[in-house]
Image (tube, rainbow, N blue to C red):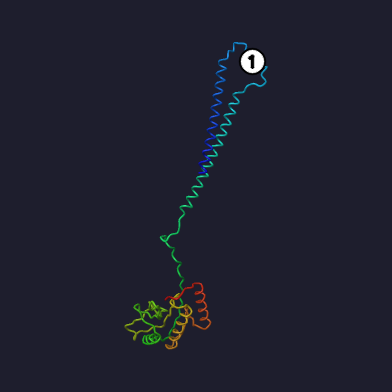
Amino acid sequence: MELELRIALLLIGVAVIAVLYFIGRSKRAVHKQEDDEFDFSTQDLPDPLEIDQPLELDDDLVNEKDQISELSDDLSNLVREEITESSNIRAAKNKVAFKHQPSLLDEQPEPPKLEEKLVVLHVMARRPQKFSGEGIESLSRELELELDEMQIFNKYVERFSGKKTLYHMLNIVKPGTFNKQAMREFETPGLSFVLNLPGPEEGLRAFNIMLEDARKFAERLNGELLDESRNRLNPQMTAHIQEDIQLFSLKNPRAAQA
């Protein structure tokens, strides 16, 4: 509304100047007609010496045109500035009006993936001996490890939603499986205990449970307890693994699965 009022006033000013211009031209036309009707053959011509200042109609006309041109240019610039300013204001309002608002229909960003950590322990038979399938099966039953459909042993914990895998026990010989149909004839040089974090239990507690079971296998089967690099596990190395698990749990906090 304010912009329309200002433009109207500017247009009125242009109209007034145009009217003044045409009035001036009409007066000059009348003077010219009178001059044409003047009889230069008479003695009524004015003495040029008695005229203090000569008439400069042409210069006045030029000055008047220049003034009108300057005023017109100024008005045009003002109108152009007003239109530009108005356009910028409308564009800014439209940008605000059509700014995207979050909606439930918008695609939700994917949650960051949780980091995972594998903790591995080995129980190796003393050379040239091997662990028998019967011994492995008997101790697994005692420690409540179950052989699944993929032919590997798992330690489970009970949750409201069902059984969850705490850790895995694999044959150290690839592909890591056991022969359920022929465990009496089965032999292996070693076992691998694998803990995948995060899991259904707090990280350090889960490791301590796996560590205790691995020690029982080493003692009962007359084997050696080794770390992931197959170095003999000692108290200092055990403490280092436990500290590493605690740091992982602090960096990746997550509640145990239900």
> Residue 213's quadrant in the figure?
bottom left
Q: What residue type is labelled 1?
A: Pro
Q: Is mark 1 on a helix, strand or loop?
A: loop
Give how far across and how far down residue 25 sits, in percent.
Answer: 55, 25
Q: Determine if residue 71 is in view.
A: yes
Q: Which of 135 and 20 is in front in this view?
A: 20
Give how far across and how far down residue 143 sits, in percent.
Answer: 40, 85
Q: Tell me what residue is drawn at x 60 percent, y 11 percent.
A: 42
Identify the residue position indicated by label 1 in the image: 46
Going by the image, does 67 lie left or right of 124?
A: right
Q: Determine if residue 171 is in view.
A: no
Give how far across and how far down residue 167 sits, in percent.
Answer: 42, 79
User: Disc count in the image?
Assistant: 1
Give how far across and how far down residue 65 sits, in percent.
Answer: 57, 29
Within 10 Å of disc 1 (Cα), the crowding (few <14, some 14-19, many 20+) is few
Q: Nearer the viewer, residue 109 or 222?
A: 109
Compared with 109, 224 (above or below) is below
Compared with 134, 67 (above or below) is above
Task: Look at the image and tell me in which quarter the C terminus lies.
Answer: bottom left
> Residue 163's quadrant in the figure?
bottom left
Q: Which of 123 and 86 is in front in this view?
A: 86
